[in-house]
Image (cartoon, rainbow, N blue to C red):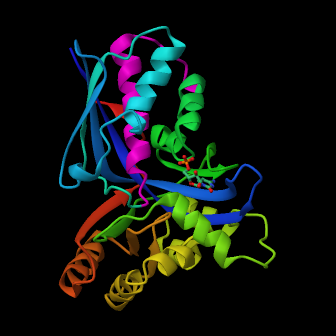
């Protein structure tokens, strides 16, 4: 008996970042959109106790110990329900690792939902979301999917209406970026400046509701982009290649280094993807559309 859960990646269409808080986190106005690139997390009872395996092109970079969010999810749920987390968690990984697309968060949400189903714990949605927030700021969104505004450190979600499908191209970089390092660089670049509180853009939320890619392209923004570019200057070339290929919007996804290009439609996305592949400025290129549902048992 095993349970498999499919979990999407995300792109941040707006990431407004406030000043560092006393606890080290930053208040955010974080507009997430779930897109159709997926990890699949399978849990199976394991006589040898908790173990994690991973397959996929980047599998070698995934930690297989208890620091993996999928392992932590099983341990936290087991702890709350008085169960040993004796499961084999297998991650079929298609979301880039350390890429700014919430791949680790997806695995945390996926393992949580899969263990809940395998063990029949029947945890409420509220309780699952609470465990997700304990696992990490982006994990609740991986459970919920669709589109949502995250406030606080990003974990407090308000679902958003989306009036259509948005077509994206993602360019994966040759190495990852550490999210804490990018936030530290954001703090360093902002030293001595007054950082305003983060505010969600009404125009952007309106563009999502209308399903209008040109209106969305005019309003996307990422306050972490200068920090990601400072740590990874070559990303500027990828962004420029996407813009030259006609992408109406080009931005770093979350803390990066994956770059995201919004296309007017699916056909234009394929054209931008081909131009990015030919540009030699990135490792791989994928197209994906969103919104898509969050973690789902398959
Ligand atoms: O919440 P999560 O564990 O995913 O966050 C990883 C790191 O990213 C934090 O330790 C912190 O350095 C940074 N972070 C932040 N502000 C947020 C979310 C994350 O500074 N709102």
From the viewer's perspective, tell me whether residue 186 is left or right of residue 5.
right
**Vertical order, 67 against 196 (above or below):** above
Seen from this angle, which residue lies furthest right?
Answer: 194
Quadrant (top left, top right, bottom left, bottom right) of the C terminus: top left
Out of 9 and 210, give the one closest to the viewer.
9
Q: Specify the segment rendered in magenta.
A: 100-125
Secondary structure mostly seen in magenta is: helix
Question: Within the image, what quadrant is residue 18 found in?
Answer: bottom right
Residue 114, given in percent of the width and then of the height, sits at 35, 25
Figure disc tally: 0
Question: Within the image, what quadrant is residue 242 found in?
Answer: bottom left
- Residue at image position (25%, 46%) is 93
Residue 169, given in percent of the width and then of the height, sits at 32, 70
Quadrant (top left, top right, bottom left, bottom right) of the N terminus: top left
Residue 5, given in percent of the width and then of the height, sits at 31, 32
**Vertical order, 102 against 206 (above or below):** above
Seen from this angle, which residue lies furthest top?
Answer: 82
Out of 233 and 260, give the one closest to the viewer.
233
**Vertical order, 73 against 87 (above or below):** below
- Residue 252 visible in image: yes
Out of 55 and 208, give the one closest to the viewer.
55
**Vertical order, 46 against 33 (above or below):** above
Residue 82, given in percent of the width and then of the height, sits at 49, 8
Residue 118 lies in the magenta-colored region: yes
- Residue at image position (61%, 44%) is 155
């Amino acid at each position: 008996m095993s349970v498999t859960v499919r979990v999407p990646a995300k792109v941040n269409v707006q990431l407004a970042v406030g000043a560092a808080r006393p606890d080290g986190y930053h208040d955010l106005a974080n507009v997430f959109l779930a897109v159709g690139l997926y990890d699949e997390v399978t849990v199976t009872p394991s006589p040898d106790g908790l173990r994690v395996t991973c397959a996929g092109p980047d599998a070698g970079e995934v930690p297989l110990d208890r620091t993996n969010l999928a392992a932590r999810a099983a341990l936290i749920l087991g702890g709350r329900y008085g169960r040993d987390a004796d499961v084999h968690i297998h991650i079929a990984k298609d979301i880039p690792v350390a890429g700014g697309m919430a791949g680790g968060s997806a695995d945390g949400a996926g393992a949580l939902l899969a263990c809940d189903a395998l063990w029949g714990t029947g945890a409420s949605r509220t309780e699952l979301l609470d465990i997700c927030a304990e696992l990490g700021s982006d994990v609740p969104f991986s459970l919920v999917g669709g589109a949502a505004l995250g406030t606080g450190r990003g974990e407090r979600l308000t679902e958003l209406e989306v009036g259509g499908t948005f077509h994206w191209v993602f360019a994966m970089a040759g190495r990852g970026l550490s999210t804490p390092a990018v936030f530290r660089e954001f703090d360093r670049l902002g030293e001595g400046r007054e950082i305003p509180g983060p505010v969600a853009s009404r125009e952007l939320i309106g563009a999502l509701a209308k399903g209008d890619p040109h209106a969305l392209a005019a309003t996307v923004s990422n306050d972490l982009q200068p920090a990601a570019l400072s740590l990874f200057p070559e990303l500027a070339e990828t962004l420029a290649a996407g813009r030259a290929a006609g992408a109406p919007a080009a931005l770093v996804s979350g803390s990066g280094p994956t770059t995201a290009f919004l296309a007017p439609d699916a056909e234009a996305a394929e054209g931008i993807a081909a131009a990015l592949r030919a540009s030699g400025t990135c490792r791989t290129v994928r197209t994906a559309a969103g919104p898509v549902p969050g973690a789902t048992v398959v």
